[in-house]
């Protein structure tokens, strides 16, 4: 089985004036390719912290004390662990900040291109003074400038005959491979994705699409723009003389412009109506659901391997929520991307996830398929969490007695023992390990000790 | 609504504001009473019946026997036709409009240079201070800017004169140019340069680069004084507004897109952090004008502020009225510009 993401024994603490908060206490996650993993739990159990740690956006007072995060086998937070092992007992926050800066530099090529994140509140997550098109184009330009450059060069090179022929191929039902081959034989790499994206649009009629494809041949490029694009294609990034102030801005202009046209294609693939207009708008001109779609578009722009969605629907009303969840299901089929969907709302997770992990006090205590979690929950916490969800049949809702523990002074042994109805003596002393109870069902609880026990 | 419609609406709103401004200036002149106006025109040699006749003639000429609101419209009419009255001070006497044409360019030059200094210093240090929050340099900047903020402008000016002008002798402390440099020049007569009345520009137009350089050096100290007095507030405000912006969700999203810290700070954060600062630009212009009056007087710099001080000292009603009206006009226009710039940079404001 191939894993996109492998998080093991991740431990993290926040140093504050009022004490040390132990936010994550040994999180284990195995995420498969193309899978949606849901993470559920009460507020304050570390769901968001987990997401932010995976993408490396930590506050200044956070220290990762143990564990690793492997993305396709490569450790993302080796730098942080190194620091923690050196200053384990008495970390100097000033040093920690420097380490964060180092981590930022290391992760800059990972964020947005291999892992991206969608945040909770779409109303405040887009920059109010930048156009939608720019905000999408920017991430394309940073991570794959050569793709943008190729697209633009192809459009300036393409001839009307080529376009007519491509159109014929598309009308005869040519697949992605043959269009790609066509573009390669004509030395027009970069045109194929534009052809396909226009052809796949659902919001336009066939006549309109034909017209758009035939008008792909664009005005010739100026000398400077041509030089910029050719250098970007040959170097694969923006460097050399393109970094000189002034020239830098001019070089980026042509790439951003092309990024805008790609943004239109991206938005239309996410079924956003009227994408040509939307890219010219500012965030305040769009509704919350629309903005969340834009943010999802930004997250998916570079075809990342992993998208972390932190409560993507919590700030939206129920009908928009349903639309976004539909979109997610649709995306799962189209892109070969893995998703981590963080939510406190189990019904949202049930809708779209393949597996669900239940989190409590900075640990994942149970992982199973959606079916198993809802029909055969094992961990007492999971059971109580599910019985706390109101159902359409009515009946008394069972709350969970007590509250999430104060993570400055976490309880000994199993963190759930003060609230657990089945508490045993050893729960108070030892923390149970995650164990496979069934093939797809992992749980950390002494109640299931000895039932097919093999550690994760 | 687009930017043009917004601009036109704001221009229409300007009319009542200007009427209010002229009303206040007009009432100011009446507070001082008719005698002051008449004293400007009556020769002290006239006595008795001749004086009474001359007084009556003047009263009729200036409509002083009419109700005050009628007088106001006569005055407004004159202002609109470019007749701003006469001034008679130690440094200039003649029509006010000519005085403005002679002195305003110098003040503009000083203000523009000071404003550029303020912008460069303020934005750079404000952003730096926020980005390196709680570092040693941030604390140093904070102490420095509070000190400057607390100091009255003449104190800064005098301190700079003493340190740079008197002890170190690196910068000239008075005037716009060294008199020896300009004696005998055809385009510089009686302390007034032609054709723009700004000596640096005139010198460049005439190819006198040495004079231009000398004038630029003379400009430095007043401009620095003016800039230092105002920049402290800008640094403080930009720092706090930048810190607030850096906590926003869209900054986190920008980072999660894989943008470098430089782009996050200088584009995503700064563009938003500058919005409240732009609102303060109107106050900055007020500060520049108020500061110019003091700074120009300290440095003997022949600008509109220097002239205003002279008018005040000489109880020159025409000059004082004209200066008040002019300062008011500049402020009103500056605030209009602020609103337009704000609408331009913040798309949410174009209601």
Image (tube, rainbow, N blue to C red):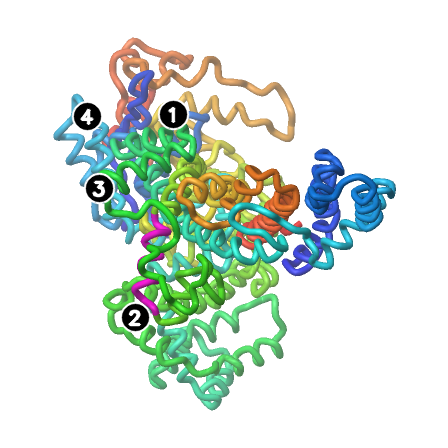
> Does residue B232 appear in this view?
yes
Observer-nearest residue: B150 or A12?
Answer: B150
Q: Earlier in the sequence, mark 4 or mark 2?
A: 4
Observer-nearest residue: A427 or A282?
Answer: A282
Where is residue A419 drawn, in percent x and y?
41, 13
**Is A133 rendered above or below residue A389?**
below
Q: Given the image, what chain letter belongs to the residue carrying mark 3?
A: B
Residue extending farthest to the right is B66
Q: CA distance from mark 4 to mark 1?
A: 26 Å
Pointer 3 local density, CA inside 10 Å: few below 14, some 14–19, many at least 20: few
Where is residue A347 drawn, in percent x and y?
53, 36
- Residue at 65%, 58% in the rendered image: B2
In the image, is residue B213 part of the stretch drawn in magenta? yes
Pointer 2 local density, CA inside 10 Å: few below 14, some 14–19, many at least 20: many
The secondary element bearing badge 1 is classed as strand
**Is A82 rendered above or below residue B115?**
above
Where is mark 2, residue-wise?
A232
Where is mark 1, residue-wise?
A360
Where is mark 3, residue-wise?
B168
Q: CA distance from mark 3 to mark 4?
A: 49 Å
**Is A114 rendered above or below residue A234?**
above
Quadrant for residue A421, please give it.
Answer: top left
Asked if disc 4 and disc 2 are in contact, CB closer than 8 Å, the reply is no
- Residue at 57%, 76% in the rendered image: A209
Viewer-nearest of discs 4 and 1: 4
In the image, is residue B328 part of the stretch drawn in magenta? no
Q: CA distance from mark 4 to mark 2?
A: 43 Å
Pointer 1 local density, CA inside 10 Å: few below 14, some 14–19, many at least 20: many
Asked if disc 4 and disc 1 are in contact, CB closer than 8 Å, the reply is no
Asked if disc 3 and disc 4 are in contact, CB closer than 8 Å, the reply is no
Pointer 4 local density, CA inside 10 Å: few below 14, some 14–19, many at least 20: some
Observer-nearest residue: A166 or A301?
Answer: A301
């Amino acid at each position: 089985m191939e894993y996109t993401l492998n998080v093991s024994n991740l431990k993290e603490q926040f140093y504050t004036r009022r004490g040390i908060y132990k936010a994550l206490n040994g999180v284990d996650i195995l995420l498969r390719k193309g899978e949606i993993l849901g993470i559920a739990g009460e507020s304050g159990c570390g769901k968001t912290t987990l997401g932010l740690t995976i993408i490396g956006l930590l506050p200044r007072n956070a220290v990762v004390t143990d564990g690793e995060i492997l993305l396709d086998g490569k450790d993302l937070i080796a730098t942080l662990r190194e620091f923690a092992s050196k200053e384990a007992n008495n970390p100097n926050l000033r040093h920690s900040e420097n380490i964060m800066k180092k981590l930022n530099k290391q992760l800059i090529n990972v964020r947005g291109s291999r892992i991206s994140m969608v945040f909770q509140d779409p109303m405040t997550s887009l920059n109010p003074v930048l156009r939608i098109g720019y905000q999408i184009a920017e991430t394309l330009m940073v991570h794959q400038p050569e793709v943008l450059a190729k697209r633009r060069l192809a459009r300036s090179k393409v001839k009307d005959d080529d376009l007519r022929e491509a159109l014929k191929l598309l009308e005869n039902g040519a697949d992605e491979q043959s269009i790609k081959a066509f573009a390669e034989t004509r030395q027009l790499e970069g045109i194929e994705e534009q052809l396909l994206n226009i052809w796949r649009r659902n919001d336009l009629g066939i006549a309109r699409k034909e017209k758009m494809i035939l008008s792909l041949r664009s005005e010739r490029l100026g000398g400077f723009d041509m030089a910029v694009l050719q250098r970007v294609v040959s170097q694969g990034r923006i460097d050399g003389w393109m970094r000189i102030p002034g020239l830098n801005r001019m070089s980026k202009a042509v790439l951003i412009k092309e990024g805008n046209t790609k943004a239109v294609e991206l938005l239309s693939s996410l079924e956003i109506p009227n994408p040509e207009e939307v890219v010219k708008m500012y965030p305040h001109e769009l509704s919350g659901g629309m903005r969340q779609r834009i943010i999802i578009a930004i997250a998916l722009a570079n075809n990342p391997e992993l998208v972390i969605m932190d409560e993507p629907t919590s700030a939206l009303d129920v009908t928009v929520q349903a639309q976004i969840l539909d979109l997610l299901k649709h995306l799962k089929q189209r892109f070969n991307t893995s998703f981590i969907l963080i939510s406190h709302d189990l019904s949202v997770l049930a809708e779209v996830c393949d597996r669900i992990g239940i989190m409590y006090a900075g640990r994942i205590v149970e992982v199973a398929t959606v079916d198993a979690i809802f029909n055969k929950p094992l961990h007492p916490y999971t059971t109580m969490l599910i019985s706390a969800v109101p159902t359409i049949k009515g009946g008394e809702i069972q709350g969970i007695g007590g509250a999430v523990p104060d993570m400055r002074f976490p309880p000994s042994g199993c963190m759930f023992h003060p609230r657990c109805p089945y508490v045993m003596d050893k729960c108070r002393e030892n923390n149970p390990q995650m164990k496979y109870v069934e093939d797809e069902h992992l749980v950390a609880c002494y109640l299931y000790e000895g039932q097919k026990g093999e550690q994760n | 609504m687009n930017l043009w419609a917004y601009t036109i609406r704001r221009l229409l709103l300007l009319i009542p504001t200007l009427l209010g401004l002229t009303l206040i200036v007009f009432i100011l002149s009446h507070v001082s009473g008719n005698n002051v106006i008449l004293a400007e025109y009556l020769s002290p040699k006239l006595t008795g019946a001749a004086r009474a006749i001359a007084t009556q003639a003047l009263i009729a000429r200036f409509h002083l026997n009419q109700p005050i609101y009628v007088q106001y419209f006569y005055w407004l009419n004159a202002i609109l036709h470019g007749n701003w009255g006469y001034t008679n001070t130690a440094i200039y006497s003649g029509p006010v409009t000519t005085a403005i044409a002679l002195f305003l360019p110098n003040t503009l030059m000083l203000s523009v240079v000071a404003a550029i200094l303020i912008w460069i210093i303020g934005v750079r240090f404000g952003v730096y201070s926020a980005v390196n929050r709680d570092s040693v340099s941030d604390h140093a900047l904070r102490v420095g800017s509070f000190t400057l903020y607390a100091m009255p402008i003449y104190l800064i000016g005098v301190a700079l004169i003493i340190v740079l002008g008197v002890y170190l002798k690196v910068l000239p402390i008075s005037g716009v140019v060294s008199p020896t440099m300009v004696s005998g020049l055809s385009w510089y007569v009686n302390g007034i340069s032609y054709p723009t009345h700004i000596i640096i520009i005139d010198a460049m137009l005439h190819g006198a680069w040495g004079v231009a350089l000398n004038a630029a050096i003379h400009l430095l100290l007043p401009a620095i004084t003016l800039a230092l007095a105002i920049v402290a507030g800008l640094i403080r405000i930009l720092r706090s507004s930048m810190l607030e912006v850096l906590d926003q969700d869209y900054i986190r999203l920008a980072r999660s897109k894989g943008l470098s810290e430089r782009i996050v700070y200088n584009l995503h954060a700064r563009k938003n952090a500058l919005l409240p600062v732009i609102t303060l630009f109107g106050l900055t212009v007020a500060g520049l004008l108020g500061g110019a009056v003091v700074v120009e007087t300290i440095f003997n710099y022949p600008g509109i502020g220097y002239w205003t001080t002279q008018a005040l000292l000489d109880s020159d009603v025409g000059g004082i009225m004209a200066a008040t009206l002019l300062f008011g006009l500049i402020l009103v226009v500056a605030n209009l510009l602020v609103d337009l710039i704000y609408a331009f940079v913040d798309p949410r404001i174009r209601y």
